[in-house]
Amino acid sequence: MRVFHIQTTSVTESDALPAHPPASGFIWIACGRREFELEQGHVQSTLQALGSVPMVDLHVSDLLNNQLPSHFDYTSQYDLLVFRRLAAGHSETDLSHPGQVLTQPTRRGGPPVLRRIDTSPVGFAVFDHVLLTVHPAGCTVLDHYATRLLAAGTSAARAAGVNLPAGPADLMLRIVNQMVDGYLELRRELTRQLDHWQAELLHPSTRFTNWGSLLDARISLHQLDEICEDQRAAIQDWIEALAGWEVVEGKSDHFGGHKGLELLKVRSRDVLEHIERVIHHVRRLEQNAETAVQMHFSAQSNRTNDIMRTLTALTAIFLPLNLIAGIFGMNFEFIPLLHDNAGFWWAMGSMVLIAAGLSVVFWRKRYLARSGR
């Protein structure tokens, strides 16, 4: 468990939960899901000591649920947002047995990029002066953002114009925005992989064999589309709830005031726009994959038609030759030219002329030509 005291100009971290509300700024309590399950009584007491109210049992169950989709809920005292982030697998550990894995990572087939389309929920409980986040075990998003937050609290960062989060809601939106950026980076790898498959599908001399991986990719893209839809619905619900917030009299512009509220709305719309970009790109990748498969089978069908047309033309060329050979192969005693010394050459000459004539006719009609690529 990590506890951060965030003020206007500084950030301090401690391992112990605070016993009293801060004189200024707000508190960020970040803990793992299994850790929150074991220490929820202590966390609830800390929330009450910090001037907030304990969380209701249903919301505690939501934070402990590792399969919960992205959604938003609220009470009169706090807001709850569950947002699914990209993860290497659903892995949870026990505090008493740190090396024991409670949940095995999800096994996926196909190329490595598809194995990255796995998600775990991160829960945010937003109070007036406290932000409680519940992460999966080994959450890189938490570690990465905590490092950035501590670096932003230094004097050098303040001199460079780096602003610290103005409140719990602002900090939540920054963390969510970092999660969405992971989806934006993932789409580039998916695009390169699907472009490679499209080139193989449309290459006329390549026999495509990665149908299983392509099917896995389409399933993963569909799953990613559903995940992003849940994320968009959750953020939209948050924005609607944010529109009902009232400016607190006596608060500064950066924390509870009009300027701080407007900043939250801007950040929320920015997060929503990033999610919509991911959804648009994922759907376009799905369409591209479907189009590439259809074009592949159309090309194969066209190639089959070319082969059948060529075989039909060759059959038509040799059909009169077989007729001539059949006539002169009859067991009649008297057949014209049969006993003539030049009969064989007349028959062969006529067969060659007929074959050459039909070949020229079929070539001019493009029956023997390959379709243009």
Image (cartoon, rainbow, N blue to C red):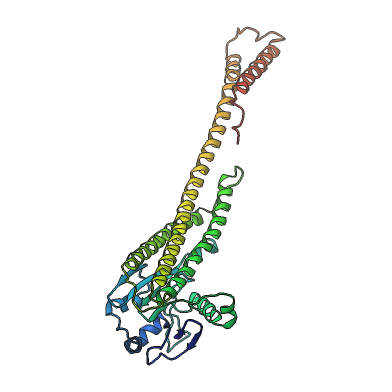
Instruction: Where is residue 146? Give x, y as percent.
Output: 50, 79
Along the line of sight, the residue nearer the viewer: 143 or 88:
143
Q: Is residue 4 above or below residue 221?
A: below
Task: Note whether residue 175 is visible.
Answer: yes
Answer with the quarter of the image where residue 225 lies. bottom left
Instruction: Where is residue 302? Give x, y as percent.
Output: 53, 36
- Which quadrant: the C terminus? top right
Answer with the quarter of the image where residue 326 lies. top right
Q: Is residue 26 above or below residue 265?
A: below
Q: Please state if 52 lies on the left or on the right of 341 as rendered.
A: left
Task: Note whether residue 116 is visible.
Answer: no
Along the line of sight, the residue nearer the viewer: 151 or 356:
151
Answer with the quarter of the image where residue 321 lies. top right
Q: Is residue 207 above or below residue 235?
A: above
- Which quadrant: the N terminus? bottom left
Instruction: Where is residue 229? Give x, y as percent.
Output: 39, 60
* Residue occupying image coordinates x 31% and y 67%: 244
